[in-house]
Amino acid sequence: MLEKKIFANGQQLYDLKGDYLTYYFKNGAIKAEGRYVKNHKEGEWKYYRKDGHLWKINTYQQGKKHGPCQRYSPEGQVETDELFEQGVRIKSR
């Protein structure tokens, strides 16, 4: 997952500090951020649009969606609100 380190334009693709991983867009804006433990996403991850607005928040356990996951409109309104258990959607709210 972390093979490529930079974009062709020289922009850093990601930054891993301890167990906190931040991904970047080619323009340098944050694309996603959260804990990365033993090569898996863990806990709450936030994803952003290129303009910096929040796009979604997912919760992971050993790399699989586990818990609440929400997606937001460009205006910040909740578009989808789902609940997952070990990667399987069990509820849409």
Image: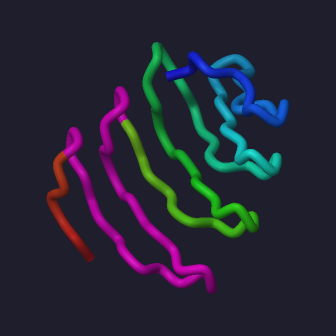
Q: Is residue 59 magenta?
A: no
**Residue 36 vertical position relative to residue 64 in the rendered view, above or below:** above
Residue 16 as seen in the image, left or right of residue 91? right
Point out the residue furthest to the front here: 8
Q: Position of residue 6 (x, y in %)?
A: 74, 27
**Per the image, is 71 magenta?**
yes
**In the rendered picture of this protein, how many numbered marks are placed on residues?**
0
Rendering colour mode: rainbow
What residue lies at 43% left-to-right and 66% top-to-bottom?
A: 70
Residue 80, located in which quarter of the rendered image?
A: bottom left
In the image, 43: left or right of 20? left
Between 86 and 31, the one nearer to me in the picture: 31
Q: Quadrant of residue 13?
A: top right
The C terminus: image quadrant: bottom left
Locate residue 21, reporting x and y percent.
Answer: 65, 30
Magenta stretch: helix, strand or loop mostly: strand
Image-quadrant location for residue 81:
bottom left
Residue 67 drawn at (x, y percent)? 33, 50
User: What's the magenta region?
Assistant: 61-87
Residue ID at (66%, 28%): 20
Q: Looking at the picture, how far across and down is residue 5, in whole percent?
A: 70, 21
Residue at 19% from the left image edge and 56% from the top image edge: 89
Instruction: Compare residues 8 and 28 and report the one nearer the observer.
Output: 8
Check the image and report above or below for 36 versus 48. above
